[in-house]
Amino acid sequence: MNDVWNLDPIYKGFDDPAFEADFAALKEKIVAFDAFTRTLADQEPLTGLRTGMGLQEEAFYLANKIGLYASLRQSADTRDARATSCMGRFLAVISDIATAQAAFKEWTAKVPDLMELVRGDDILHAYEFYFSKTADASRYLLSGRGEEIMARMELSGGNAWSDLQSYLTSTVKVHYDGGITNLPTVRNLAYDADPGVRKAAYEAELACYESIKDAVAFALNSIKLETITDCKLRGYASPLERTLKHSDMSRATLDAMLGAMDEYLPVFWKYLRAKAKALGHENGLPWYDLFAPMGRAARKYTTEEARDYLLKQFATFDDELTGMVAKAFDEAWIDFYPRSGKTGGAFCSGVDCLGESRILTNFDGIFSDIVTLAHELGHAFHNWCLKEQRPMNRDYSMPVAETASTFNECIVMNAAIAAATDKDELLSLIETQLQDVCQIICDIYSRFRFEAMVFENRADSFMHADDLCALMRKAQKECYGDGLDHNVLHPYMWVCKSHYYGPTFYNFPYAFGGLFARGLYAQYQKEGAAFVPKYKKLLQTTSVATAEDTAAVAGIDLTDREFWRGALQSVADQIDLFCQLVEEENAE
C-alpha cells in the first residue's frame, strides 16, 4: 500500500503543461468575469444572473484545482520552494477576482424580485441559498476597490503570517532522547504506553517552542488585528458575529450549545480526576497524561490492517460509504506517515475536479490513528455526497463540517466497544473515546475562550509570548477545572494549533460537530437502516441551508438546549461506566 498520496490525477507536477495551461485559462476566466461585471448596468436581470454564475463556475473549477494542488504539495513538505512560489502566484491571481465578485454581488442584491427570478430558473434555482446569502451579505461588502485591496493585502498579511506559523512549527528541531526529531513525531508520543516517554516528550515539546514563540506571537497578533480591522470596516459587531454569519449559524444555537457544555463541564472533570487517580496523581491529571492509554496496552496496526478494520465496521452501516473508503486506500488518497517538513495533525481536502478527496495524517499505528482515519474519511464521504451539487454549492459551513467525520468515529468506536471481550479491553476503548470527547468539550472550549480573550486584548495592545501563555493557562484552568494539575498545563497550545491562524473561531465547530453527530448516531440506533437515506440527505443539505435548517432534516431544533443536553448525557453515562471500571480495577 502507498505511504504517500497520489496527486498525479490532478497534475503530474508544476512542470506539467496542463498546470500552466490551466493557470493561463484561470487568468482568462477572471478577466472575462471582470469585463462582464463592467457591463452589469446594461444587463437584463435574468441574463446577467445566468452569465455571472456561469463565469464564476468556470473560474471556481480552475481555482479549486490549481490552488488545491499547490496547497497539498505545500502541506506534504513546507520546505518545497516550488509549491510555496506557485501558491503565491495563485493567490496573487485569484485576488484579481475580488473586485468583480463584489460588484456582481452588489448588483445581484439590488435585482428586483431576485428570489422569484432565481426560483423560477432551471439552473439558478439550485443556487437559491447562495443568492439569499448574497443579498444578506451585501451590506458587509466594501465599496469601490475595497474588496480587491483587502484580498491583495491578505497576501502579505494574514496568509503570510499563517504560512510563517506553519513553516516554523513544521521545521522546528525538537531535542528528544539524545537526538533531534520533529514536532508531529514528538507530539504523537503523548499516546505512548510508557509514562516516562510521555513526560519526556511533553517536556521536549514545550522546550522547542522557546526558539519560535516570539515569531509565532507576532504572527498571531498580526492575524487577529487584521481580523478586527476587517470587521470594523465591514460593519460586523465583532469577529464572532462575522464567524457566525459565515457559518450560517445563529447566536441562539451557539448559546444553547455552550450553555449545555457549561452545565456538563464538572462531569468531564470527574472523568479526568478518576483517570488521574488511576495513574497515581493526587492533584489532577498532568497535561502529559491526558492521552495516556489505559486498560490493555494498545496494539499497533499497519495501514493495511487499518483499512480492513474500517471496511468491516463501515460495511454494517452503508455500502456507498464502504466503497468510497476502499477507493481511498486502494487509489492512494492518503498521505500516512509523519516526516520532517510535513504539516502536523490531519486534514481532508475535497478534489472537486476528480470527485475525490485527499487526506493527510501522521499515522503511528495506534488505535486512535484508526479513529483519526475514520474521522478524515468522514469528511471525504461528506465531499462525496456533494459531488452532484453545482460547483459553487459544494462548500459547507464550519459547524456542520464535522458532522460526517464525527459520525464515522461513532460507528467505529461503538462497534469496537460492543465487541470488547473483557474489562481491560472495554476500559481501553471507553477511555479512548472519552479522550476524544474531552478534547471537543474541554479543550475546544478552552480554545474558544482563549481566542475570545485574544480579540478582547488585541484591540488595544500587543500580546507578547508570555502574555499569550498566561491567557492560555487561564482558559485551560476555566475549562478543565480541577480535572487537570494546574502546575502542569500546556501554555504553548496557541503556538502549535494551526486553527488560530486560519478562519476565525475555528474551534466551536468541533464541539458542534461532535455533539450533533452523537445526536444523529443515537437516532440511527433507534431507526436502523431507515435512517441512512435521511443521513445522506442531511449531508447533501449542509451546503445549501443554514445549520438550523440542516438539522431540521432530521427533526432537530438546535436552539433547544435540551438537544445538546441529550448528546452530552450519552457521554456522561460513559463517564460513569469508566469510573466504575477504574474503581473495580483498583479494588482488584
Image: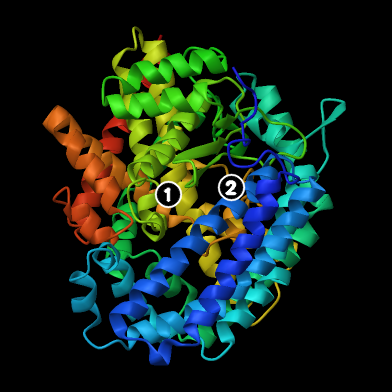
Which residue is labeled 1 in the image?
A: 510
Callout 2 secondary element: loop
Front-most of residues 418 and 338: 338
- Please identify the quarter of the rendering in which residue 32 is found: bottom right
Q: Is residue 461 left or right of residue 136?
A: right
Q: Position of residue 21 (x, y in %)?
A: 66, 54
For badge 1, the amino acid type reads Tyr
User: Label 1, label 2: how many angstroms apart (C-alpha)?
Assistant: 25 Å
State the residue lying farthest toward the right. Answer: 178
Q: Residues within 10 Å of mark 1 (few under 14, many from 20)?
A: many
Residue 577 visible to an observer of this rendering: no
Q: Residue at x 30, y 86 (%)?
A: 111
Can residue 242 be seen?
yes
Task: Please name which of the two marks, 1 or 2, marks the residue nearer to the observer.
Answer: 1
The answer to whether 110 is drawn above or below residue 290 in the figure is below
User: Is 328 above or below relative to 405?
Assistant: above
Amino acid bearing label 2: His
The percent coordinates of residue 212 (x first, y second) are 80, 53
- 186 on left or right of 179: left
From this view, report whether residue 577 is shown above or below residue 171. Answer: above
Q: Residue at x 72, y 64 (%)?
A: 160
Label 1's element? helix
134 to 496, vertically: above or below: below
| Circle on res. 486 | 2
Indicate which disc, 1 or 2, sits on the residue closer to the N terminus: 2
428 vs 38, nearest the viewer: 38
